[in-house]
Amino acid sequence: MNSALGGRFRRGELEDLAISFLVLALLFSNFDPRNLPYVVVAVLTAFVFHELAHRSVARHYGYFAYYKRWDTGIVLALLIGILTGLLTGRVWIFAALGAVYIYAPYQYWEDREAYGKIGLAGPLVNIVVGVLAMALMRAFTPLTAPWWVLKTTASINLWLAFFNLLPFPPLDGWKVLRWNTGYWAITTGVAYLLRAII
């Protein structure tokens, strides 16, 4: 199957994306089916678009790139979500459910610029979607269903951007920081400030 964001999908890749998406939707909905309609659009744009952006930029640089779910991370996310939901009434999100795997069979060194740009692509998509959702919120009456969908979309996208820009391996922020401190600082600051004003 072809994709405008990065070419053909590897066998099992769509299944891995779908499973990870469903788990994140459950977590962000606080395991409450009434929240799912508001969360589905948010998680689709925040998670799927994020991963496809990494994949697309990696393939632009000539790397083999595909999304693969991490089953241990999925089990941990569900356990943490269920336990924190029962103990505190609010689900804590463990968002490491998988990653875009990147490799070049004949390249024996790490291109920090390429890896930095690949790492930055996902959070940048989240920031752009978050800003668009915030702008569109103005077109709807506050507290109506479309307004809540857009607010949730903005909130989750900007949270995911900030989380992924934390400067710790294997998060995107570590790759961006190693490549360009200025870009890392600006995008992290923008994600934090926008998330704070929603």
Image (cartoon, rainbow, N blue to C red):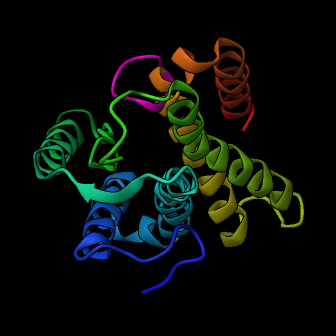
Is 64 placed above or below 197 here? below
Q: Is residue 169 magenta?
A: yes
In this rendering, position of residue 186 left or right of residue 22: right
In this rendering, position of residue 27 left or right of residue 42: left
- Residue farthest to the front, as pictured: 106
Residue 178 in the image: x percent, y percent?
52, 15
Residue at 53 percent across and 27 percent down: it is 165
Seen from the viewer's position, the closer of residues 152 and 4 is 4
Residue 152 figure quarter? bottom right
Residue at 56 percent across and 37 percent down: it is 161
- Residue farthest to the top, as pictured: 181
Which segment is the magenta one? 166-173
Seen from the viewer's position, the closer of residues 72 and 61 is 61
Q: Main secondary structure of the magenta part?
A: loop
Is 173 placed above or below 102 here? above
**Quarter of the image where the C terminus is located:** top right
Residue 17 in the image: x percent, y percent?
33, 66
Residue at 32 percent across and 75 percent down: it is 14
